[in-house]
Image (spheres, helix red, strand yellow):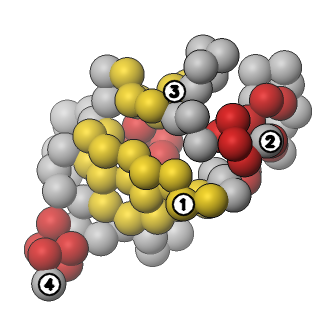
Amino acid sequence: MSTALPKIVRVKPLGGHRLEIAFADGAEGAHDLSWIFETPGPMNEPLRDPAYFARVFLEVGALVWPNGYDLSPWNIRKRMKDGGELRTAAVAAE
C-alpha cells in the first residue's frame, strides 16, 4: 500500500451532490457527497444548494468550495474504495 497522500486531479459535478472524481494515480469514480450534511454546520450549509455545490474546484489536490469548505482527498478516496465506487486505472481504461 502506498504511503503517498492521494491527490485529486479532476472533478466534475454530476448533479445533486454527486461528483466524478479522478485521482493522480488514474483511479476514478462517481461519489455522492450527501453524507457531508450528517453533521450540520455553517460551512457546509451553503452546499445544500446543488448550484452552489457545483461550484466545487480543486486546490492542492483537495475538493474546495468558494466559502472555504474543503474535504480531505484521503477521506474521499477511502469512502469511494469502501463503497466500491473507485475504478483503478486499468479498469477505467477498458
Label 3's element?
Answer: strand
- Place of residue 28 in the rendered image (x, y in percent of width and height, measured from the top left): 31, 61
* Mark found first going from the N terminus, 4 or 3: 3
The residue to which callout 3 is attached is 64
The residue to which callout 2 is attached is 48
Identify residue type, mark 4. Answer: Glu
The answer to which of 35 and 2 lies nearer the viewer is 35
Q: Residue furthest bottom?
A: 94
Q: Is residue 84 left or right of residue 8?
A: right
CB contact under 8 Å: marks 1 and 3: no
Label 2's element?
Answer: helix
Q: Which mark is residue 61?
A: none
Query: Distance between the Cα atoms at labels 4 and 3?
Result: 30 Å
Q: Is residue 88 left or right of residue 18?
A: left
The answer to which of 74 and 13 lies nearer the viewer is 13
Q: Which mark is residue 14?
A: 1
Identify residue type, mark 2. Answer: Arg
The residue that appears at 24% across and 60% down in the rendered structure is 27
- Place of residue 89 in the rendered image (x, y in percent of width and height, measured from the top left): 15, 66
Q: Which mark is residue 94?
A: 4
Label 1's element?
Answer: strand
